[in-house]
Amino acid sequence: MTEKVMNCEETKRHVHEYLQKELSEAELESITTHIANCDHCEWEYDFEAALNRTIQMSCTETPAEEIAEKILERIRSIDLNDIQH
């Protein structure tokens, strides 16, 4: 079986599912390896993890699926290079 190698684009696309452990074991392992070796993706992972913790502490109600997806799309569209500087 060939292990899928995650690049930055794939890692960014799946970071939410990674944090929720909604991926296969092979995908989780591949993303873990990528994050450990990529400072940019590690920063994005840390940002999303902190955001998820903040939302969990602040929100007692689960948003509608449509709203949650729109929020995630917006977050993913933000150029993190602009935030870091």
Image (cartoon, rainbow, N blue to C red):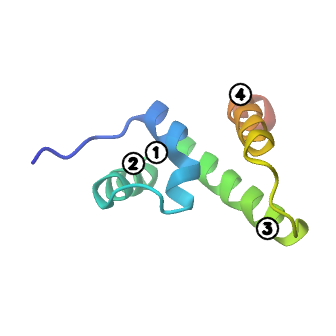
Using the numbered discs, state the Cα–Cα distance from disc 2 to disc 3 in whole angstroms.
26 Å
Say if 16 sits above or below 56 in the image: above
Label 2 belongs to which residue? 34
Amino acid type for the residue under numbered disc 3:
Gln
* Residue located 78% across and 29% down the image: 82
* Label whose residue precedes the other's in the sequence (4 or 3): 3
* Label whose residue precedes the other's in the sequence (3 or 1): 1
Label 4 belongs to which residue? 77
| Residue 24 appears left or right of 79 | left
* Label whose residue precedes the other's in the sequence (4 or 2): 2
Q: Are marks 4 and 2 in contact (CB under 8 Å)?
A: no
Name the residue at the left extreme: 1
* Residue located 50% across and 44% down the image: 14
Between disc 2 and disc 3, the foreground one is 3
* Label whose residue precedes the other's in the sequence (1 or 4): 1
Q: Position of residue 68 (x, y in %)?
A: 76, 45
Label 1 belongs to which residue? 38
| Residue 28 appears left or right of 3 | right
Task: Inspect this view and state whether residue 24 appears.
Answer: yes
Using the numbered discs, state the Cα–Cα distance from disc 4 to disc 3 in whole angstroms.
22 Å
Label 3 belongs to which residue? 56
